[in-house]
Image (cartoon, grey):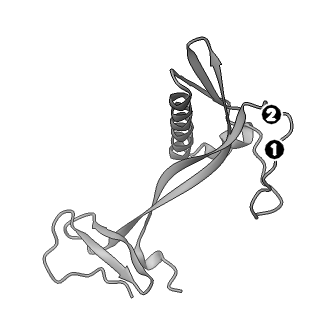
Amino acid sequence: MMTIRSRRPLAAARRLPIKSNTGYIGRAIRARAGNREAHLKIPVQVHWELPIGVKREGKWYISWCPVLDVYSQGETREKAIENIVEAIQLLITSCFERGTLAQVLKRQGFKRMGTLGALPRRRTRGLPKEVKMLKVPVPFFVERRPEDLCPA
């Protein structure tokens, strides 16, 4: 059962813990002083497993993601990987915020797979040997009212 009401006077932006029978869900955020409606901000992290390539060119390491057509660089191999991960995160979040993520993915050739299970762990033909699969975390949060959550 969720507890979101308080008998104390509301402050402009008070955070109240929300508990349920399954444990901690999030914190309710009071948006306005006169509004008794609470919103949950639930952090969610989506991991994209993408092919990432890194090769050395002169003093620099060039990193790229062939399926998203994103490139970056760094003075070390680790810095080049860190930079490409950041570039991919920025691409995904900015497209999501503008409402163009589906359009960009389709333009890059993304298609839904027939199965929803885990992908088989095998090397994709045609990719250069310096390209490896890497998990790229992309943080989001879900903002919901407690009454919108499934009671089950």
Q: Is residue 99 above or below residue 37?
A: above
Name the residue tied to disc 2: 127
Residue 14 vertical placement versus 61 (above, below): below
- Contact (Cβ within 8 Å) of mark 2 with mark 1: yes
Q: Looking at the image, which residue is at 78% across and 53% down?
A: 121
Decide: few, some or many residues near mark 2? Use Cα within 10 Å; few <14, some 14-19, many ≥20. Answer: few
Q: Look at 73% across and 37% down and name the residue there.
A: 107
Q: Distance between the residues labelled 2 and 1?
A: 8 Å
Q: What element carries label 1?
A: loop
Which image quadrant is residue 15 in?
Answer: bottom left
**Which label belongs to residue 94?**
none
Please state which amino acid type lies under the numbered disc 2.
Leu
Q: On screen, 23 above or below 143?
A: below
Above or below, 7 relative to 145: below
Q: Quadrant of the C terminus?
A: bottom right
**Which residue is rendered at x = 36% and y = 84% of the image?**
2
Q: Give the left or right position of residue 36, taking residue 149 as reference.
A: left
